[in-house]
Image (cartoon, rainbow, N blue to C red):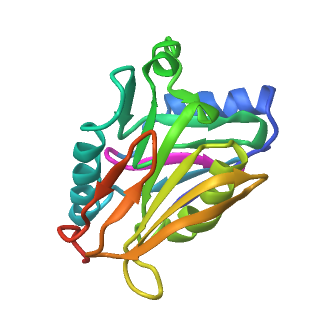
Amino acid sequence: MSALPADPTPGRHWDELVRFWEESDWPEGSKVEIIDGIIVVTPPPAAPHNRIAEKVHRRLYTVVPDDWGVYQTLGVAHPSRGRLYVPDLVVIAESAVAELEGSESAPLMAAELIVEITSPSNASHDRLNKAAAYAEAKVPLYLLIDRFAPSGPTITLYGEPEADVYRVLSSVKFGEDIHLPAPFDLTLETSAFPVG
């Protein structure tokens, strides 16, 4: 993982930082995000990570409204906080994506659900920084699939954001089902999630 420090405030420095993020030649397959004004580059996810993303992605498409999309590489930005994330999955209205016209990121506040799957290099960001940022942006639901939780692989659904804190709606171990409430009303079976 590498980082390039930058001023986290919006405006001239934010615009330069985003332009650098958009125009640089990053290693193929890597995830490049702006976390609190710092560009963070992480290696491509491993096969188990991708298998979990694919399974959740497939299930979400069975329940999302026709005018919403499920995206795997869409950047979502919160410029006033110096943040531009690329969640493993983001459910967002297609109208928010259609309005981008050349921009590489959608507004974080437009997301309906964000799914993050931890990797060894990003687990603390997913558990702490991103959870706080998503709550602060009032993203209604945040699903954290934590393959590397200290107590063993877990899935935690957060909701009811207030300030920069979510309420834990449900938390289960891999192998147990977890239910996403309305507007999804979806039960995810996690028995096929790879642990390693």
Closest to the observer, 174 or 19: 174
Q: Left or right: 148 with respect to 132? A: left
Q: State the residue at coordinates (31%, 75%).
A: 174
* Residue 104 shown in magenta: no
Q: Position of residue 120 (x, y in %)?
A: 42, 73
Q: Position of residue 142 (x, y in %)?
A: 52, 53
Residue furthest left as drawn: 192
Closest to the observer, 172 or 75: 172
* Residue 30 shown in magenta: yes
Q: Left or right: 34 with respect to 60? A: right
Q: State the residue at coordinates (77%, 32%).
A: 13
Q: State the residue at coordinates (68%, 52%).
A: 161
Q: State the residue at coordinates (79%, 52%).
A: 163
Would you place residue 67 above or below residue 31 in this image? above
Q: Position of residue 150 (x, y in %)?
A: 47, 86
Would you place residue 145 above or below residue 80 in this image? below
Q: Left or right: 175 with respect to 26? A: left
Segment colored magenta = 28-36
Would you place residue 153 above or below residue 109 in this image? below
Asked where in the image residue 26 lies, by quadrant, the reply is: top left
Q: Position of residue 186 (x, y in %)?
A: 33, 50
